[in-house]
Image (tube, helix red, strand yellow):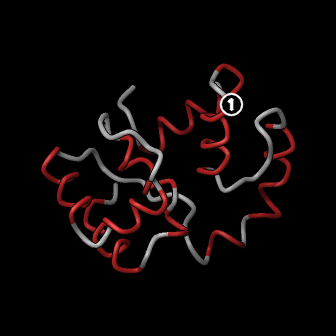
Amino acid sequence: MPPGGAPALECLEKNKAKVSAGCARAVNAAFGGGAPAAAPAAAAGAAPAAAPAPAAAPAVIVLRPLLPREELFIVRSACGADIRTLCAGVAPGGGRIIQCISNNAASLSPACKDVLAPFAAR
């Protein structure tokens, strides 16, 4: 499975019981839920009630696979401050920083969202 994007998040969601606690929290955050990793059934049951909230701002921006120079462009662009704020503890490499800002879409600055828009998966 290629790293990043919706298919990878869905795979992680299905295998949440097998991943680390930190990864499970990130998967929950990516799907817009704040439910603990041990309660996937509760999160699934709460999905219809939580559906109206993401309409204002997407919880996750799904990006197409990026070239290294495109990732560098995003890091050096208007997203730099967002990355320093939202992804401070994320180790660079392997697309982890890009995945972090994708997962924190609701908290991104409007300028960073504008930078990411051309790279969105279609």
Q: In this view, does 43 lie to the left or right of 63?
A: right
Left or right: 4 in relation to 74: right
| Location of residue 33 in the rendering, given as x and y in whole percent from the top left corner | 72, 53
Q: In which quarter of the image is residue 22?
A: top right
Q: Residue furthest left?
A: 69
Question: Which residue corresponds to the image point at 32% horizontal and 67% vertical from the top-left?
Answer: 79
Number of marks in picture: 1
Amino acid at pointer 1:
Ala
Quadrant of residue 48 within the rendered picture: bottom right
Give the residue at x 42% y 44%: 5
Give me the residue at 60% from left, 78% from top.
56
Relative to 86, say whether 68 is above or below.
Answer: above
| Residue receiving disc 1 | 21
Mark 1 Cα shell of 10 Å, populated few (<14), some (14-19), many (≥20): some
- In the image, 3 versus 23, the foreground residue is 23
Whether residue 33 sits left or right of residue 70 in the image: it is right
Q: What element carries label 1?
A: helix
- Whole-percent x and y of residue 57? 56, 73
Relative to residue 108, is residue 119 drawn left or right? Answer: left
Above or below, 82 against 18 in this view is below
In the picture, which quadrant includes the C terminus? bottom left
- The residue at the point 55 percent across, 66 percent down is 58
